[in-house]
Image (spheres, grey):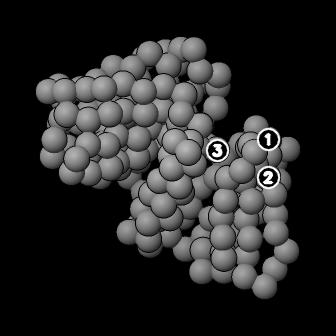
Amino acid sequence: MKHKRLKLCTILLLVFGLTGLQAQTMYVKTTGGVQTSYALSSIKKLTFSGGNMVVTPMGGSTSTYVLTNLRYVTFDGFTGISETEQTTSGLTLFPNPVNDILNIDLSEAKDLNGTINILSLDGKLLQTKQISGDGIISIDVSSLPSGIYICNYSNKAEIKSAKIIKQ
């Protein structure tokens, strides 16, 4: 139940977060170098299940991507994000990409009493840390394999998420 709720929150954050950015296109590139683009207005459903990402366009055939075979998933309209720092509505992660220690700057957060969760792209909870009263939090992510993860910060007033690239 907890994993389903986290997966749903992650998907909702991605979907509703993208509407604020007014992205027009989603690009999916596999490790084999094949890139596919989807107009966001044509996507009926985007789901993550069993280590796969499933894209269901309106009136088209469903495409399934194995997450471990993806080089990246990105959206146009993402601007101003450097390779060493990513900011999403007050959640700043650095360095990003990260090797061992991820720093999270929560100085813009409304309440510093909350929880930081590190999630896999399919919504599995990998790490969690309760925090209180500190603006910059450090988390050891050295045990995570290389890949893309989601850092989620939540408290009574807000939920913030950002992408982590682990080298």
Nearest-to-viewer mark from 1 and 3 = 3
Q: Position of residue 120 (x, y in %)?
A: 59, 37
Residue where numbered disc 3 is placed: 122
Q: Specify few, some or many for label 1: CA neighbours under 10 Å numbering under 14, 14-19, or 20 or more.
A: few
Residue at mark 3 to residue at mark 2: CA–CA distance: 12 Å
Question: From where the camera sits, is residue 95 visible?
Answer: no
- Looking at the rendering, which quadrant does residue 60 occupy? bottom right
Residue at mark 1 to residue at mark 3: CA–CA distance: 14 Å
Q: Please, what is the three-letter code of the amino acid marked with disc 3?
A: Asp
**Residue farthest toward the front in the current orientation of the protein:** 1
Q: Please, what is the three-letter code of the amino acid marked with disc 1?
A: Asn
Is 166 situated left or right of 42 in this image?
left
Question: Is 145 located above or below residue 21 in the figure?
Answer: above
Marking on residue 65: 2
Q: Position of residue 64 (x, y in %)?
A: 81, 57
Indicate the secondary structure of the residue bearing disc 2.
Answer: strand
Is 144 situated left or right of 9 in this image?
right
Question: Is 112 located above or below residue 36 in the figure?
Answer: above
